[in-house]
């Protein structure tokens, strides 16, 4: 199945999609907010009634066809084939949003109350967060203020930072470059503190990107091979993480595990002399080398500790795509940025989708309840919102590319 694509014209820098609202930063730093659900309704009316289920599943309710609820329908080949044909039909041409449609769904335009340009952004607990050279800032976006984003931001932290990650079950992780990896629980008014404060005096490590792996957090860097700060919680020892609600009790720190200890073949220099890049998300830890991506499955509930990190497979990469820039694991697969293009390695038979050109920015919505199947790619003159829908039909426990779907872990 090819991805569906919505194209929004304009000169943008970044986007966030949260609770039916699309927040888009223009290149001048201003923010325009659109009613996403209303915009999709207008698109579905224009394309006809056959598009409605496809549009909803692809762009509005990415979780709709997941879970065991639909297993009975997917066992019927006719129903499954009909659904796939519908997706294929509307994936043949991009859906271009008209100027009149955008204007009618515009909830407000405003000066950016947060420092701009930022290095990363997230929306967590109805607050918009951004990080950059000035530190960590937040502003409410709960729909109760005069502007879509509150004009009274809070400076949460003054340390320069590069990346943010959110977890429904804990809080926010912050990649602070040379200062290392930090975390906080803003829902409890906690200030950021070192995530590696438990490592018994071991020096902190450079961190430019981070992501949650259940209660643990993975720190990535282009300067070294990356590491996981491994935590556990007593309530998880006898039950699945997905069955838990938000927890107030403290976690237990287990260890800091280096990537060289996770990947059995060890870490070595690639052809350009730089250390290979590693990253982790939810139940997968990945390592990029010149010709392949190595994948390790992470299972914090393994009875034997040596079984927590299991080699899961290898994904070949063609060299012509240029030098490696960055990578993230999404629900639908792995997104890798090279000099010449973005490459999406789908969970469906590792089929690749090449997205040519050099984007201004791109974003996946890890663990988002409704939008985890989307990839936003921002170019100089437009935003392309791609929806990957092949993953509905995959065995979530066996897929090599992409993390395992969990409704309870979605934010």
Image: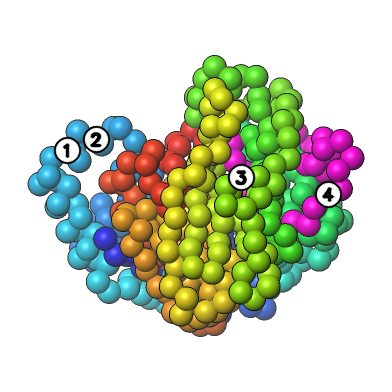
Q: Which residue is mark 4?
A: 204
- The local secondary structure at tag 4 comes to loop
Whether the magenta-drawn stretch holds residue 305 is answered as no
Q: Is residue 198 left or right of residue 42?
A: right
Task: Please tell me whether residue 374 is drawn above or below residue 250 in the rendered image.
Answer: below
Q: Which quadrant holds the N terminus? A: bottom left
Q: Is residue 110 left or right of residue 186?
A: left
**In the rendered structure, which disc, 1 or 3, sits on the residue that comes first in sequence?**
1
Image coordinates for residue 22, horizontal then vertical, percent: 52, 60
**In the rendered structure, which disc, 3 or 4, sits on the residue that comes first in sequence?**
4
Q: Which residue is mark 3?
A: 262
Cα distance between the residues tagged 1 and 3: 38 Å
Contact? badges 2 and 1 (CB < 8 Å): yes
Pick the front one: 308 or 374? 308
Q: Which quadrant holds the C terminus? A: top right
Q: Which residues are magenta?
A: 187-214
Image coordinates for residue 186, horizontal then vertical, percent: 74, 40
Cα distance between the residues tagged 1 and 4: 51 Å
- Residue at the location (73% across, 26% down)? 252
Q: Which residue is mark 1?
A: 75
- Residue at the location (13% across, 40% down)? 76
Q: Tell me the number on the disc at residue 71.
A: 2
**In the rendered structure, which disc, 1 or 4, sits on the residue that comes first in sequence?**
1
Contact? badges 1 and 3 (CB < 8 Å): no
Contact? badges 3 and 4 (CB < 8 Å): no
Image coordinates for residue 341, horizontal then vertical, percent: 48, 77
């Amino acid at each position: 199945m090819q991805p569906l694509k919505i194209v929004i014209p304009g000169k943008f820098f970044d986007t966030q999609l949260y609770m039916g609202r699309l927040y888009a930063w223009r290149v001048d730093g201003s923010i325009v907010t659109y009613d996403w659900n209303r915009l999709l309704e207008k698109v579905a009316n224009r394309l006809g009634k056959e598009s409605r289920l496809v549009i909803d599943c692809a762009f509005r309710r990415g979780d709709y066809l997941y879970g065991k609820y639909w297993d009975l329908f997917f066992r019927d080949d006719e129903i499954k084939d009909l659904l796939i044909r519908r997706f294929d039909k509307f994936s043949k041409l991009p859906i271009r949003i008209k100027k009149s449609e955008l204007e009618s769904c515009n909830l407000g335009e405003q000066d950016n109350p947060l420092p701009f340009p930022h290095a990363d952004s997230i929306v967590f607990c109805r607050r918009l967060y951004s990080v950059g050279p000035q530190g960590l800032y937040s502003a409410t976006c709960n729909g109760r203020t005069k502007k879509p984003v509150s004009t009274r931001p809070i400076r949460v932290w003054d340390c320069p930072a590069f990346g943010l990650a959110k977890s429904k079950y804990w809080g926010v992780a912050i990649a602070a470059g040379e200062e290392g990896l930090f975390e906080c629980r803003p829902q409890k008014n906690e200030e950021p503190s070192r995530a590696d404060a438990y490592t018994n005096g071991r020096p902190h490590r450079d961190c430019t990107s981070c992501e949650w792996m259940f209660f643990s957090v993975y720190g990535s860097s282009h300067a070294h091979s990356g590491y996981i700060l491994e935590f556990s919680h007593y309530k998880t020892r006898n039950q699945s993480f997905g069955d838990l609600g938000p927890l107030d009790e403290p976690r237990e720190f287990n260890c800091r595990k280096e990537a060289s200890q996770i990947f059995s073949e060890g870490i070595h220099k690639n052809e350009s002399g730089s250390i290979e890049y590693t990253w982790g998300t939810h139940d997968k830890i990945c390592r990029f080398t010149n010709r392949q991506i190595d994948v390790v499955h992470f299972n914090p509930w393994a009875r034997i500790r040596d079984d927590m990190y299991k080699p899961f497979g290898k994904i070949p990469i063609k060299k012509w795509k240029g030098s490696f820039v960055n990578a993230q694991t999404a629900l639908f697969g792995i997104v890798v940025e090279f000099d010449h293009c973005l490459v999406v390695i789908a969970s469906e038979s590792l089929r690749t989708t090449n997205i040519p050109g050099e984007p201004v920015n791109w974003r996946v919505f890890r663990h988002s309840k409704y939008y985890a199947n989307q990839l936003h790619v921002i170019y100089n003159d437009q935003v392309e919102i791609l929806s990957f829908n092949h993953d509905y039909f995959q065995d979530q426990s066996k897929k090599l590319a992409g993390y395992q779907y969990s409704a309870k872990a979605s934010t």
